[in-house]
Image (cartoon, rainbow, N blue to C red):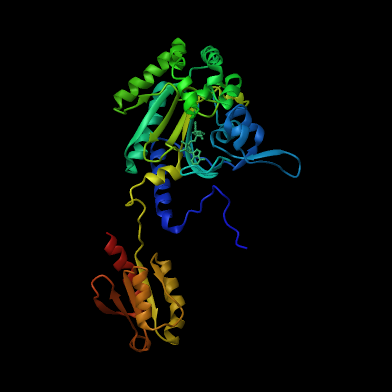
């Protein structure tokens, strides 16, 4: 019996990989231009780390983590996101200090046991960035403009920025209580999940997709009306800075996010082109998380971009990087015997060289070269060997010329690099 891949995971095949590599390249360039440095964190951590940061009442912690016990009985989970691990690493390696600003980014797979559908996988890739050490609202706008710039560089169109503020530890409890009163009054109009969330995590009710819950919470109190003076001023400066940067946004006061660590600014970049899974990138501020995980009080903000969703939006022109191939067509045993050394020398000079050691006819080798869209073919038969040449054929204009065998590698590598300049 054939063994297939696990449901909800996806192979990324060579035909698509150009897009992935181009996205990674563009992301590294944009992030590093903004002062971010890469960090590589483990794909598994103690379950406790995620439970304490993402929050007990969230879907991720309640039902989406891949958790197991190792042979020593420690509870371990595959990472459902990157923020918790980055903060853990920053604390553990003493990257945080009173005046230190850390800008870190990561690229890699995350794991969530969600119901698979278009744009939603159980192993998916994120490009994430975290900025630790300042709560200046201009930084929030800078993070958003950086993300916007990256999407622009990649030619992604039709994206909107949704923005909200969730307040701080002073004003959020007031909002939570106000919302809870409202939801309790709504009572039976809510789905069973939302009834449970009313006690546990009332903000999540605003995110429920059930049309009855949507209707019942249409008049729910707005989080923005409960912000304290400091949070209001903070949000105002974020908006003014975005206006100055000419970065359009819409306020969405129901944007509550599925992770509990957020404070103040939260955001999502959304599109109408992906169906139900419309968030391409999302994030926000988490000013209490470092302290919650045992580090010195340090504010932070960050985002993660879903690579599968981003790649689904890319124009087809992105990631097409055909390499110039030289196909070597040896005819007869003596030529085949010379082929490994010739190929090795070509590749040592950076030429993408291919052959087929099967000793097939010239016609069949030309067909093969055509199929792999080779730019040049080097024909080497007994006649050429006797004469000490390779017959070089340009596959575009069909020109042929004899190149001395001992100069062949040099001629090819300079011809290809000249073609590129
Ligand atoms: P998140 O909203 O859970 O936030 O995920 C961020 C992005 O990852 C989503 O907008 C989406 O594009 C992608 N994503 C999430 N789940 C899936 C899935 N099952 N399949 C495909 N793509 C998915 C976070 O993960 C936070 N750590 C972001 C952050 C960083 N906040 C502050 N710093």
**Image height check: is 2 above or below 275?**
below
Q: Which is more toward the observer, 36 or 113?
A: 113
Quarter holding residue 137: top left
**Image height check: is 412 above or below 9?**
below
**Residue at image location 42% in from the left, 82% down from the top:** 360
Q: How many marks?
A: 0
**Residue at image location 44% in from the left, 81% down from the top:** 338
Residue 256 visible at all? no
Q: In the image, residue 69 lies at what x, y percent?
A: 72, 41
Residue 43 visible at all? yes
Q: Which is more toward the observer, 215 or 78?
A: 215
**Residue at image location 51% in from the left, 54% down from the top:** 11
Q: In the image, residue 279 lies at what x, y percent?
A: 43, 35
**Image height check: is 248 above or below 174?**
below
Viewport quadrant of the N terminus:
bottom right
Q: In the image, residue 71 lies at what x, y percent?
A: 75, 45
Q: Is residue 390 left or right of residue 341?
A: left
Quarter holding residue 298: top right
């Amino acid at each position: 019996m054939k063994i297939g891949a696990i449901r909800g995971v996806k192979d990324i095949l060579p035909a698509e990989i150009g897009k992935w590599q181009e996205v990674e390249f563009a992301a590294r360039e944009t992030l590093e231009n903004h002062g971010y440095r890469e960090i590589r964190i483990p794909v598994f951590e103690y379950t406790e780390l995620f439970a304490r940061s993402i929050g007990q009442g969230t879907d991720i912690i309640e039902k989406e983590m891949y958790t197991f016990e190792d042979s020593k009985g420690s509870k371990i989970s595959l990472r459902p996101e990157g923020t918790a691990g980055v903060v853990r690493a920053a604390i553990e390696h003493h990257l945080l200090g009173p005046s230190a600003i850390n800008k870190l980014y990561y690229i890699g797979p995350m794991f969530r046991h969600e119901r698979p559908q278009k744009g939603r996988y159980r192993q998916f890739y994120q490009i994430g960035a975290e900025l630790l050490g300042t709560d200046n609202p201009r930084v929030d706008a800078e993070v958003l403009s950086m993300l916007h710039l990256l999407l622009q560089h990649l030619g992604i169109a039709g994206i909107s920025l949704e923005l909200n503020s969730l307040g701080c530890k002073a004003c959020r409890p007031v909002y939570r209580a106000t919302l809870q009163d409202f939801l309790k009054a709504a009572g039976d109009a809510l789905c069973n999940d939302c009834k449970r969330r009313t006690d546990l995590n009332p903000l999540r009710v605003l995110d429920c997709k059930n049309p009855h819950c949507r209707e019942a919470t249409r008049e729910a109190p707005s989080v923005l009306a409960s912000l304290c003076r400091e949070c209001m001023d903070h949000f105002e400066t974020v908006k003014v800075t975005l206006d100055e940067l000419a970065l359009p946004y819409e306020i969405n006061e129901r944007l509550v996010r599925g992770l509990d660590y957020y404070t103040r600014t939260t955001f999502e970049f959304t599109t109408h082109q992906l169906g139900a899974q419309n968030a391409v990138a999302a994030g926000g501020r988490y000013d209490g998380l470092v302290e919650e995980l045992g580090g010195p009080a340090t504010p932070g903000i960050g985002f993660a971009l879903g690579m599968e969703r981003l790649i689904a939006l890319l124009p087809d022109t992105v990631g097409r990087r055909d390499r110039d191939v030289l196909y070597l067509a040896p005819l007869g045993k003596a030529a085949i015997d010379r082929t490994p050394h010739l190929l090795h020398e070509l590749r040592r000079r950076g030429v993408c060289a291919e052959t087929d050691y099967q000793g097939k006819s010239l016609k069949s080798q030309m067909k093969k070269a055509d199929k792999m869209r080779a730019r040049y073919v080097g024909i080497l038969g007994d006649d050429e060997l006797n004469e000490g040449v390779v017959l070089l054929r340009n596959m575009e204009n069909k020109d042929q010329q004899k190149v001395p065998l001992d100069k062949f590698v040099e001629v090819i590598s300079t011809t290809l690099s000249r073609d590129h300049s």
